[in-house]
Image (tube, helix red, strand yellow):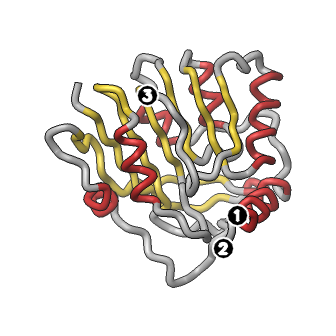
Amino acid sequence: MSATDAVTFWDGVYAARPASDAPRPNVRLVEAVSDLSPGDALDLGSGSGGDALWLARRGWRVTAVDVSGVAAERLAGHARAHGLDDRVDAVRLDLRASFPEGRFDLVCAHYLHTPFDLDRAAVLRTAAHALRPGGRLLVVDHGSTAPWSWDQDPDVRYPAPREVAAGLGLDPATWRVERAEAARRTATGPGGRTAEVVDHVLLVRRAG
């Protein structure tokens, strides 16, 4: 499918969701990053923008990219409204075609799943190489299907974190896996609906 198809699909997904005045950060980001000193962060597939805004409030300088212009524009608006526009650069970008320039202390990719062709391993490998020494790559994937997910394919397969790490082909002398686990939590979806979900959490650190 074309880049236009992907943009149209994801613009539709975000346009159909009411814009939140205060999008929340992902739980696994808060767990992994709260104790880190702020620096430069890259948010891949920034979505509603909760992660980027949370990082910016904690002093990080964030480049937030999403294939959806609707998502990127909403995030830019939130950043302006909260006085964080000097710390958040919201960009519409198709990771199938390009990757943000720069070096980062943190790259996070939460639920970077799509029905369109995307060489995810290549994107995440490039992200690992974009880390500064001592920087971390946080990949959080779905390990189960929430009742409100856009993807309700009963045959979908969720690779384990160690399998994702192996697929990146990173030299263990340079990149060390700090965390690889399936973690359960109670998630809240649209309309306040709750369900138990599984997150596949992978945290990789580049040697200092």
Residue in the foreground of this view, choosing between 44 and 21: 44
- Amino acid on which disc 2 is placed: Met
Residue in the foreground of this view, choosing between 1 and 9: 1
Q: Is residue 63 left or right of residue 38?
A: right
Mark 3 or mark 1, earlier in chain: 1
Mark 3 or mark 2, earlier in chain: 2
User: In which image quadrant can residue 76 be found?
Assistant: top right
Local secondary structure at mark 3: loop
- Amino acid on which disc 1 is placed: Ala
Residue furthest to the bottom in view is 155
Could you tell me residue 155's position as x and y percent? 50, 84
User: Tags 1 and 2 in contact by the CB under 8 Å rule?
Assistant: yes
Name the residue that disc number 2 marks: 1
Q: How many marks?
A: 3
Q: Is residue 149 left or right of residue 79?
A: left
Q: Is residue 94 left or right of residue 19?
A: left
Local secondary structure at mark 2: loop
Q: Residue at x 46, y 37 (%)?
A: 107
Local secondary structure at mark 1: helix
User: Tags 3 and 1 in contact by the CB under 8 Å rule?
Assistant: no
Instruction: Give me the C-alpha separation between circle 1 and circle 2.
Output: 7 Å
Q: Residue at x 29, y 44 (%)?
A: 179
- Amino acid on which disc 3 is placed: Arg
Name the residue that disc number 3 marks: 103
Q: Quadrant location of the C terminus?
A: top left
Could you tell me residue 72's position as x and y percent? 74, 41
Q: Residue at x 40, y 35 (%)?
A: 130
Name the residue that disc number 1 marks: 6
